[in-house]
Amino acid sequence: MNRIAFALIGTAVATLALTGCGSSIQKDASYSDVLGLRDAYVATGAVADPKCDSKVTEDGKAQWGWQTVNCGMNTVLLVADSQSGLDQQVTTSVKYAASRESILVGANWMIRGPEFEVKAVQAKLGGQLKN
């Protein structure tokens, strides 16, 4: 390979690193699936080491129309197909929220986790806190 090819590759790698591999953060966005929400959650940089799973849990997909991904031991991300599915999960989560745990609700998504992390994510992703 010549120097021009190496320069182009280097520029492409630097661009991807600066843009978060193409993922962008939009406030108050909706997501087509929970992996899109996970990518936005990670891209916020609000949580130092989020340790999000790549495996989607679809236990509630057939009955309630939602899917989840865990980020670490204390945070759950959820995307719902319908407003009623989201409302049902928000109501349940608020009812059983632990001390110092917050629920952040967006257009078709919810994040449940430690209060300080959820508030930091809200500054970037938008949504409303429910407690």
Image (spheres, rainbow, N blue to C red):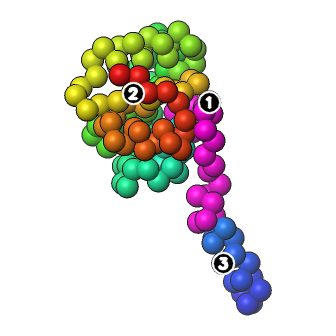
Q: Earlier in the sequence, mark 3 or mark 2?
A: 3
Q: Is residue 131 magenta?
A: no
| The one of 111 and 124 positioned closer to us in this rendering | 124
Residue drawn at (63%, 49%), measured in percent from left and top?
A: 24
Q: Residue 25's x, y, as percent?
A: 60, 46
Q: Secondary structure at mark 1?
A: loop
- Residue type indicated by callout 3: Gly
Q: Which residues are magenta?
A: 16-36
Q: Amino acid at mark 1?
A: Ser
Mark 1 surroundings: few (<14), some (14-19) or many (≥20) residues within 10 A: some
Q: Amino acid at mark 2?
A: Ile
> Which type of secondary structure does the marked residue at label 2 adopt?
strand
Q: Which of pointers 3 and 1 lies earlier in the amino acid sequence?
A: 3
Q: Nearer the viewer, residue 130 or 106?
A: 130
In the image, farthest residue toward the right: 4
Q: Which residue is mark 2?
A: 103
The mark lying in front, picked from 2 and 1, is 2
Q: Which mark is residue 92?
A: none
| Position of residue 41 measured from the top left corner of the image (x, y, whole percent) | 49, 43
Mark 2 or 1 closer to N-term? 1
Q: Are marks 2 and 1 in contact (CB under 8 Å)?
A: no
Relative image position of residue 86 (x, y in whole percent): 49, 16
Residue 99 seen from this side:
yes
User: Looking at the image, which residue is at 59% across and 66% down?
Assistant: 17
Residue annotated with mark 1: 30
